[in-house]
Amino acid sequence: MKFTIDGSLLSTVISELHKVCASRSVIPILSGIKIEASNEGLKLTGGNSELFIETTIPTNTDSLKVLEGGSVVIQSKYFSELLKKLPAKVHIQSGSNNEIVIKSGEIVTKIPGFDANEYPKLPDVNSQQIVKLRLGILKDTIKQTLFAVAKNDAKPVLEGVRIELAKGKLICVATDSNRLARCEVNVSSDLTEAIVVPKASLLEVLSSKENDNTIIEITLGNRFLTMKIGSTKMISALIEGNYPNTETLIPTAYISTITMNRKNLLAGIERACIFSGALKHNNVHLKLSENGSMKIASSSTEIGMIEESQKIVEMQGNDFDITLDGKYLAEAIKAIHEEDVTFQYNGSMRPILIRPAQSRSYVQLISPRRTH
């Protein structure tokens, strides 16, 4: 294997792959990045037991010249750090015993590698179940749900986002049993399928630097999911298990519906969180005042108290008195992009529904906190 490449281009790709490489694994070769050179270009692969990312740099660019084909696996940590400190063009070739020689100007380095044949064979997700949509749409859907996944839950299935395809819609759902976020978008697909995708895999989609108008091609398999974005392909293992039926959790009738300015409300919630105290689960109290405004309050023996009133944009009903986790509430409001946010209330000990004022395609539920 022998090729010359622009150092900054290679450094950028290797840095991205290094993030998903297994730093500690029972399979040592997974700490490395597989490099395959051919007349078509460079194929670089990094990953761990749950996620692999494969990026291709084509030869039809002035940045790459492949002189000799071949393959090798190189330690990602040292390779990534070295490339950041090398100038200009980089010349790389593999020698005997999988040793990699790297030259840049007058600088020569040698790094031991692994036999590429020992690198795990990636799952081949051959399926007719393919969905295409704009990257920006998928990113927005992920952002509006990913924050609600469980962290180190006793039920591993809750540590991912459930993605469902049904009747021309893509529906993402996440819950940690105390809150729920659900977002749906229209897609050109007749598929009916449901899978649970790990949080780490979806974070990689969010980190993609491709233009939001780029089409992402999603291929569904039995145990794996492939997402192709431009010259990059991600292969993710799916989380197995029965995801809870969240549809039955969303109420259809409410005591009160209140709409408020999102920006002002978020600022008030964040101020209240300063005084809520972690030991009290960041409790923030929302109550309808006699003058028709919303009172936002919190207190802590160690810190003090805060109370403020905010104007209500629109109101139906005359009852609203609930205590919520302020952190959860702030995250819910941040995920909404509209100017106003709507609360739908069904009692002080019933989950509150939160949604954008003008949209029905995105909803959140947060369970109340007991104050005594």
Image (cartoon, rainbow, N blue to C red):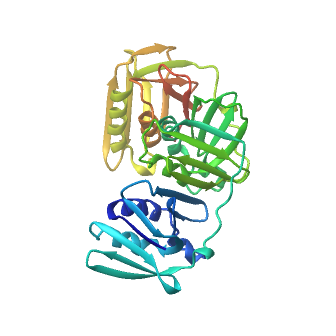
Q: Quadrant of residue 116?
A: bottom right
Can the viewer see residue 348 in this picture?
no
Can the viewer see residue 52 in this picture?
yes
Q: Position of residue 256 (x, y in %)?
A: 53, 18
Residue at the limit of the structure toward the bottom, as seen here: 97
Q: How many marks?
A: 0
Q: Position of residue 290 (x, y in %)?
A: 40, 16
Q: Residue at x 45, y 57 (%)?
A: 59
Q: Quadrant of residue 283?
A: top left
Q: Residue at x 50, y 46 (%)?
A: 230
255 relative to 270, above or below: above
Q: Position of residue 41 (x, y in %)?
A: 49, 60
Q: Which residue occupies the foreground of this view, 71 or 295?
A: 71
Q: Which residue occupies the foreground of this view, 332 or 366?
A: 332
Q: Which residue occupies the foreground of this view, 207 or 132?
A: 132
92 relative to 364, above or below: below
Left or right side of 59 for 220: right
Q: Position of residue 183 (x, y in %)?
A: 56, 33
Left or right side of 346 for 93: left
Q: Residue at x 61, y 30 (%)?
A: 187
Q: Residue at x 66, y 53 (%)?
A: 238
